[in-house]
Image (cartoon, helix red, strand yellow):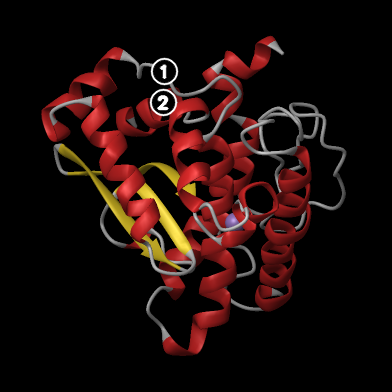
Amino acid sequence: MATNNDPSLLVQPGRRSFLGAGASLLLVSALGGWSRSGSAATPSLAPPPYGESALDPVISARTIGFHYGKHHKGYVDNLNKLIANTEFADLPLDKIVAATAGKADKVAIFNNAAQTWNHSFYWNSLRPDGGGAPPAALKQAIEASFGSLDALKKELATAAMTQFGSGWAWLVGEGGTLKVVKTANADTPLTQGLKPLLTIDVWEHAYYLDYQNRRADYVNAVIDKLLNWGFAADNLAR
Ligand code: MN
């Protein structure tokens, strides 16, 4: 579908309603054909900006169905239960993540809020017919920081492969440079003074149905065929 190539569609309604929204956003379900709708609870479960089978065969419709419909939805539902009638109830999602990071008595809220945020960011980090060449400004920044696009891809793959257990590999901005980091479980660069540009989910639920234990095959296929460099470029420019 042509709209998949339009970065404004990739980053606008779904992303906003996920990442920064307050209480009153309605879900936009038209973009990717997901049929979920319902009350405008905060935070909401905005759908990936493409259809369930759009990333096939790199990521199957079955994986997306479970990943979005069960795992991601589980985080959103848990979060909404946890924050009901608390000081977090009306905060935008990124503020909930920031306000609970590192607080021993808020671990459950942090985990579910950060996982909600991370997953939305992940859906937008991928696109059908992704990979390829980044937009010029991002490409320049990549070459300045890593030497070449290939060097970045290698470093990203290594981070994704060497994250022990569940977690995430990220391309981030820090000051004027770009770097690759990995985080465990729900941890997110959002609370580490870094600007997230794109991410790869390396929790087993992200790939096990399609790749079983072959995380490297999943990671390399995502990097080569699905990464949404336009989303990373937009994040870098903001
Ligand atoms: Mn996941």
| Residue position marked by numbered label 1 in the rendering | 132
The residue drawn where x is 64% and y is 59% is 205
The residue drawn where x is 49% and y is 89% is 105
Give ligand 1's quarter of the image: bottom right
| Residue position marked by numbered label 2 in the rendering | 229
Q: Which image quarter is the C terminus in?
A: top left
Q: Left or right: where does residue 103 sit relative to residue 37?
A: left
Q: Estimate the x, y position of residue 84 in percent, counting from the top left.
A: 71, 75
Q: Estimate the x, y position of residue 109 in percent, counting from the top left.
A: 57, 75
The residue drawn where x is 64% and y is 55% is 208
Callout 2 amino acid: Trp
Q: Estimate the x, y position of residue 73 in percent, counting from the top left.
A: 74, 58
Q: Nearer the viewer, residue 199 or 147?
A: 147
Q: Estimate the x, y position of residue 29 in percent, counting from the top left.
A: 79, 34
Q: Is residue 141 above or below residue 205?
A: above
Question: Between tags 1 and 2, which lies in front?
Answer: 1
Q: Is residue 16 above or below residue 137?
A: below
Asked if the residues shown at circle 1 and circle 2 are in contact, with their CB atoms under 8 angstroms apart, the answer is yes
